[in-house]
Image: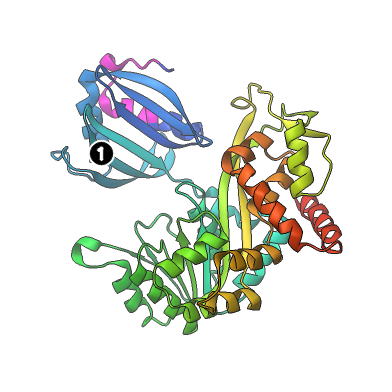
Amino acid sequence: MIEYDVANTPIVDLVNQIIVYAVKQKASDIHFDPEEKYVKVRIRIDGLLKNHAKIPKEFERNIATRIKLMAGMNITENRLPQDGAIKNTIAGLDLDMRVAALPTSHGEKIVIRILDYTRSLKGLGSLGFTKKNFDKLQTMMKVPNGIILVTGATGSGKSTTVYSILQELNSEGTNIITVEDPIEMDIEGINQVQVNSEIGLDFARVLRSALREDPNIILIGEIRDSETAKIAVRASITGHLVLSTLHTNDSLTTIERLLDMDVERYLLASALTGVISQKLVRNLCTQCRQLDETTDYEKEVFRRILKVNVPKIYKPKGCSNCINGYRGRTALQEVLPINENIRDLIADENVSKEMLRNAIYKSEVTTMIQDGLEKVLMGITSFDEVYKAIAIDDELDNYVQREMLLTENEIPKINSQIKKDTEFL
């Protein structure tokens, strides 16, 4: 916990100091939590919230007012939730932040989301794709029309991946239009449209207009409802490449969600090019990670899922360069290109969930748990991080079923591919 001299520090400087500290620590969020006797400040680093400071209750209103002024929010309204944005230079740092205020029983809770798109600017190669998944994504991006979906929970790096794909596709001969709420990153050479539902400028309306602007590629910030999903699908089958995000966990649930949104099966089967599902896990600190023997449970998971015997893996230790043995984050990814067999099953109204699951996971897809375990073998992350991100016990049950579908000839191919993937990173 840091002690701020609140009584002798102007509120403007106090807020700036908290923000600058969080940015330098590579935090993703700053939480101002009102309590009965004080305001608790917490910062989220590598996905985990840590207590940062306690500020006396009498300064709560001044802090909230200062942040809301910076974010262009209504400082007289504290009964309703509000959203705002901060684009400013503080202590020489160019900052892009989103602000959300929520009334609680003890006052307004304010969360500042610190946007960092340095990874997007570095390109797709910096996002932790294995060679197999990277090659699949490159193939999907070369398709002139169709939908590529990036899926995952809030804060799983979807926007970073989508913007990296846009950077790769951005060229002189390509007209790219984005429809976003809000616009998270300004990209030179791309036409970006901010949705404003209050005046009727919603996703569906902007999309209809965007289709008349001769686009090659359209980015929809997020598919939120049935109308947007249907327009996106129709846009893709009329010669456009559509990129978007969706809050689903894997390839199978993504397809099911779109069908639940009443997208016609035959249109979805024609339109869907591929799905990229991802979750974030913490990286092991390369300065202090250490090899340790695997437990019986870990050995069983590696044996069952990757078909390999693993006597030792890297585990966290902790040093002055990291937090409890971890520093930074990487993504676990599942990349599914839609092949003809999967298309036929999506179009079939009589197909069961199990038939679709078997078709997806009998294809060349590397599941998220396979990707995670491969990254454990490479020392990128730990088994504990993969365990927290993925329901491994459920996955083991799925793999028992998948083993019945694999022939003796297919298992050596899987092991060979794992070797190639680990060599890439």
Tell me what residue is drawn at x 21 percent, y 67 percent.
Answer: 200
Tell me what residue is drawn at x 48 percent, y 46 percent.
Answer: 116
Q: Can residue 190 be spotted in the picture?
A: no
Left or right, 285 with respect to 47, comes to: right
Q: Quadrant of the N terminus?
A: top left
Tell me what residue is drawn at x 53 percent, y 79 percent.
Answer: 347
Q: Secondary structure at mark 1?
A: strand
Left or right, 135 with respect to 51, comes to: right
Give the residue number, with chain letter if any, for mark 1.
102
Observer-nearest of 352 and 182 = 352
- Using the rendered view, name the quadrant where residue 93 is placed: top left
Q: Which residues are magenta?
A: 3-18
Rendered position, 223 above or below 321: below
Q: Residue 419, how many percent across, how many down?
A: 82, 53
Rendered position, 99 above or below 181: above
- Using the rendered view, name the quadrant where residue 199 is placed: bottom left
Instruction: Indicate yes or no whether the magenta region holds residue 13.
Output: yes
Instruction: Indicate yes or no whether the magenta region holds residue 209.
Output: no
Q: Can residue 321 be spotted in the picture?
A: yes
Observer-nearest of 251 and 186 = 251
Tell me what residue is drawn at x 30 percent, y 42 percent.
Answer: 100
Q: Residue 361, how many percent across, how many down?
A: 67, 62
Q: Residue 195, how many percent across, how many down?
A: 30, 63
Q: Name the amino acid type tagged 1.
A: Leu
Q: Residues within 10 Å of mark 1 (few under 14, many from 20)?
A: some
Q: Which SS type dominates the magenta stretch? A: helix
Q: Residue 57, how many percent across, how many down?
A: 23, 19
Rendered position, 50 above or below 258: above
Seen from this angle, which residue lies furthest left? Answer: 76
- Using the rendered view, name the quadrant where residue 402 is placed: bottom right
